[in-house]
Image (tube, helix red, strand yellow):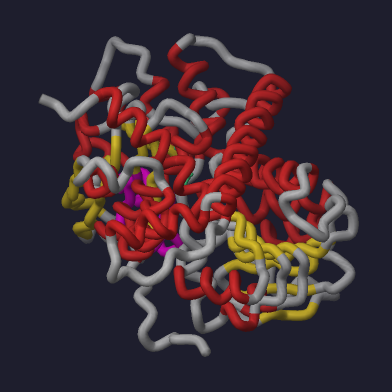
């Protein structure tokens, strides 16, 4: 049965376990001794101490991080999160996933991530602004348009990115600094489509998977039941877009709890209620769900779109969905992955499901560098192309791994005779392999400096 007491929830260890599962299937990674370790290790980790004067005059000292995981394919790219759980390990794992995500989505960036350990709901707008400014000032030239480009993540948004831009620009006068940060407001060099991009991309991946037969049993989204954990940027837009696409969004949740309606929620009503009351809970006419119960409701598609390590070995046996689509980064633990696979539940992994945000961030960066702006139809068309290609690459990679499984198994046993048998190639393994092969090719052609 499950192994709740012993499961390791350290995010960096989870990222490593996912990486290790992909290495045996990745061409030449083991052949070139030491390359796997080089690819996994973060390039640079910065920790900053941030004294910030709070509204009551007290000086609170926060801790911030920025990790650049890899810059061989281009400058670092990744969000900034404000959250109590922020640690060096968490930020490093998230930066690592950004490297694979950018490689898989084929945008010319490496991976990075940043965060400040704080509790956003308790902060005033002015306190949040002061934390942002102090953090960006402290990072100095470790960020920049050709070095490492931040964007929104948990509890940060376009307003936060406007402060990031303003602070960076004050420190670099006389230059076009718009490309130093993405996810900015539209009036300040932001891109059409950026806000809903992660959810839009996720929907495109699911639609494409269904269209090419990658999700057996699905013919379309009409009437398909969907449950969504999280009602932030990703969860809220997913709820709206899936219901517009004909799906029945039967459950949504946020930190306060969840709501359920087997006939499908009216998402416009949920949005109004959430805006008025600050939460989705207690919407009249819906059944209340306890925190995390949303992960266990009967549905066809479950979208964890909140935070990491939500589906674990403890609750995975109770998941009732046919497909889990990772809107959040790292919501499923390796223990849960194994259980879901045994139970025949497909997991569409984060690095394939949620790169829509960083893809449109890339479009924003290109527009900023060229001092231009694109129409939303253009952004939508190019996003669709990127998401479809990434999906096709993962499916083709998985087919290759499944076909050659015995060969990979024998080759690995020859190198590591004491290792357990290789896992069956999942979409997560295939996505990692596809990303790793792109990174490996770049490392190989650039060579090791000096
Ligand atoms: N924070 C988002 C992610 O995890 C977006 C990053 C970006 O746009 O750079 O993918």
Using the rendered view, name the quadrant where residue 179 is placed.
top left
Q: Is residue 55 visible?
A: no
At 47% across and 17% down in the image, what residue appears?
368
Q: Is 91 rendered above or below residue 273? A: above
Residue 351 coordinates in the image, percent (x, y): 51, 48
- Determine whether, in the image, residue 404 is placed left or right of residue 224: left
Is 296 placed above or below 65 here?
below
Tell me residue 34's x, y (percent). 20, 46
Observer-nearest residue: 217 or 359?
Answer: 217
For the point 46% across and 53% down, the residue is: 407
Residue 298 in which image quadrant: bottom right
| Residue occupying image coordinates x 77% and y 66% | 300
- Residue 121 part of the magenta segment: yes
The C terminus is located in which quarter?
A: top left
Q: Tell me the magenta residue range.
A: 113-131
* Direction from residue 203 to residue 425 in the image, left or right: left
Percent position (x, y) of residue 28?
Answer: 34, 41
Tally of numbered tags: 0
Who's the residue at 52% across and 24% down the image?
A: 364
Q: Position of residue 149 (x, y in %)?
A: 36, 32
The answer to whether residue 289 is magenta is no
Please state if 322 lies on the left or on the right of 442 as rendered: right
Q: Tell me if residue 112 can be seen.
A: yes
């Amino acid at each position: 049965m499950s192994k709740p007491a012993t499961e390791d929830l350290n995010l960096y260890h989870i990222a490593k376990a996912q990486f290790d599962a992909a290495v045996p299937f990745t061409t030449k990674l083991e052949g070139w001794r030491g390359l796997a370790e080089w690819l996994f290790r973060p390039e640079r980790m910065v920790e900053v101490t941030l004294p910030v004067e709070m509204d009551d005059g007290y000086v609170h000292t926060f801790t911030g991080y920025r990790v650049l995981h890899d810059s061989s394919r281009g400058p670092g790219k990744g969000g900034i999160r404000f959250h109590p759980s922020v640690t060096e390990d968490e930020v490093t794992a998230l930066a690592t996933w950004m490297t694979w995500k950018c490689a898989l989505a084929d945008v010319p960036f490496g991976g990075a991530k940043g965060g400040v350990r704080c509790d956003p709901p308790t902060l005033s707008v002015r306190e949040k602004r002061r934390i942002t400014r102090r953090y960006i000032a402290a990072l100095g030239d470790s960020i920049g348009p050709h070095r490492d480009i931040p964007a929104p993540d948990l509890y940060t948004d376009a307003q936060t990115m406007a402060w990031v831009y303003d602070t960076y620009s004050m420190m670099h006068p006389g230059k076009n600094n718009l490309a130093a940060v993405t996810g900015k407001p539209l009036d300040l060099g932001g891109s059409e489509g950026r806000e809903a991009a992660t959810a839009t991309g996720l929907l495109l991946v699911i639609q494409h998977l269904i269209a090419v037969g990658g999700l057996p049993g699905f013919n379309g989204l009409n009437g398909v039941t969907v449950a969504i954990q999280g009602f932030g940027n990703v969860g809220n837009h997913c709820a709206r877009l899936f219901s517009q696409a004909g799906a029945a969004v039967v459950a949504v949740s946020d930190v306060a709890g969840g709501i359920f309606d087997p006939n499908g929620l009216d998402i416009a009503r949920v949005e109004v209620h959430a805006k008025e009351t600050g939460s989705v809970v207690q919407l009249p006419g819906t059944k209340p769900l306890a925190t995390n119960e949303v992960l266990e409701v009967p549905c066809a598609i479950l979208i964890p779109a909140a935070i990491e390590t939500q589906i674990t070995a403890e609750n995975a046996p109770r998941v009732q969905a046919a497909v889990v689509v990772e809107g959040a980064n790292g919501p499923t633990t390796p223990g849960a992955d194994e259980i879901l696979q045994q139970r025949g539940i497909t997991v569409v992994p984060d690095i394939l499901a949620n790169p829509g945000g960083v893809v449109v961030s890339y479009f924003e960066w290109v527009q900023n560098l060229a001092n231009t702006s694109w129409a939303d139809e253009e952004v939508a068309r190019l996003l669709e192309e990127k998401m479809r290609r990434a999906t096709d690459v993962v499916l083709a990679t998985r087919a290759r791994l499944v076909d050659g499984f015995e060969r990979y198994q024998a080759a690995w046993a020859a190198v590591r005779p004491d290792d357990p048998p290789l896992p069956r190639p999942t979409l997560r393994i295939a996505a990692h392999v596809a990303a790793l092969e792109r990174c490996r090719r770049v490392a190989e052609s650039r060579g090791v400096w000096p």
